[in-house]
Image (spheres, rainbow, N blue to C red):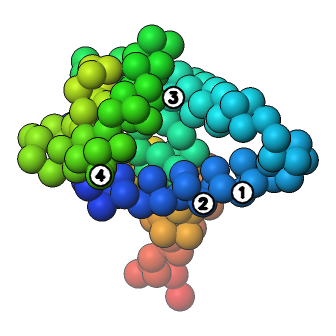
């Protein structure tokens, strides 16, 4: 079952990305003295690009339980990730975020960057049963006791009192 990511969850992932990017890029800027802004932007772009190709999203997406996939459900390729990020940075966010807000009117919740790249953001539905050990469905302390493999000693019934005995 495909569950498209809601606007609220995507916004949460975006906020997480901004916070994490500020931490990483702020540290990198402090180390380099803030002089090489092009290199810092390239580093940011590569982190996000590799995240989409290898992990199916940025760290914010993954923490929010989202995954970016192609419209046929396959992993995002290198070109798709490039197009998605390029359109996001250059086309979706600059006009007052209209390209990202476009998802509010889309059935599949796709922004301009998703439409251009042929991607869709979906929720990763995981169940605890899938990640739990097999015995967790019926823990040992809740199972019915198993009868022993060797039957217990059978008591021999006492002989009935015979009428011939005194």
Circles 1 and 2 in contact, beta carbons < 8 Å? yes
Residue identifier under label 2: 19
Callout 2: SS: helix
Nearer to us of marks 2 and 3 is: 2
Residue ID for mark 3:
52
Residue 124 sits in which quadrant?
Answer: top left
Asked which secondary structure carries label 1, the reply is: helix
Q: Is residue 11 above or below residue 155?
A: above
* C-alpha span from label 1 to label 4: 24 Å
Q: Give the label, 1 or 3, closer to the camera.
A: 1
Q: Residue furthest bottom?
A: 166
Q: Are marks 1 and 3 in contact (CB under 8 Å)?
A: no
Give the alpha-carbon distance from disc 4 to disc 2, as whole Å. Answer: 20 Å
* Structural crowding at the residue carrying mark 2, measured as other residues with C-alpha within 10 Å and reported as few (<14), some (14–19) or many (≥20): few
Discs 1, 4 touching: Cβ within 8 Å: no
Q: Is residue 51 left or right of residue 130?
A: right
Up the image or down, 42 lies above or below 103; here it is above
Where does residue 94 sit, x and y in percent of width and height?
36, 43
**Which residue corresponds to the image point at 48% horizontal and 69% vertical from the top-left?**
142
The residue closer to the viewer here, 108 or 154, is 108
| Sequence-wise first label, 1 or 3 | 1
Q: Earlier in the sequence, mark 1 or mark 4?
A: 1
């Amino acid at each position: 079952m495909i569950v498209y990511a809601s606007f609220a969850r995507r916004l949460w992932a975006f906020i997480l990305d901004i916070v994490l990017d500020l931490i990483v890029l702020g540290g990198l800027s402090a180390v380099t003295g803030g002089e090489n802004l092009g290199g810092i932007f390239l580093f940011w772009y590569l982190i996000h690009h590799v995240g989409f190709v290898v992990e199916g999203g940025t760290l914010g997406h993954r923490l929010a339980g989202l995954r970016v996939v192609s419209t046929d459900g396959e992993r995002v390729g290198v070109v798709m990730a490039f197009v998605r990020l390029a359109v996001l940075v250059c086309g979706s966010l600059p006009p007052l975020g209209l390209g990202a807000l476009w998802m509010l009117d889309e059935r599949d919740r796709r922004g301009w960057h998703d439409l251009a790249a042929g991607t869709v953001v979906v929720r990763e539905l995981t169940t605890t049963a899938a990640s739990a050990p097999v015995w967790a469905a019926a823990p040992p302390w809740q199972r019915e006791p198993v009868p022993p493999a060797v039957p217990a000693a059978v008591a021999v019934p006492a002989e009935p009192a015979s009428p011939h005995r005194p």
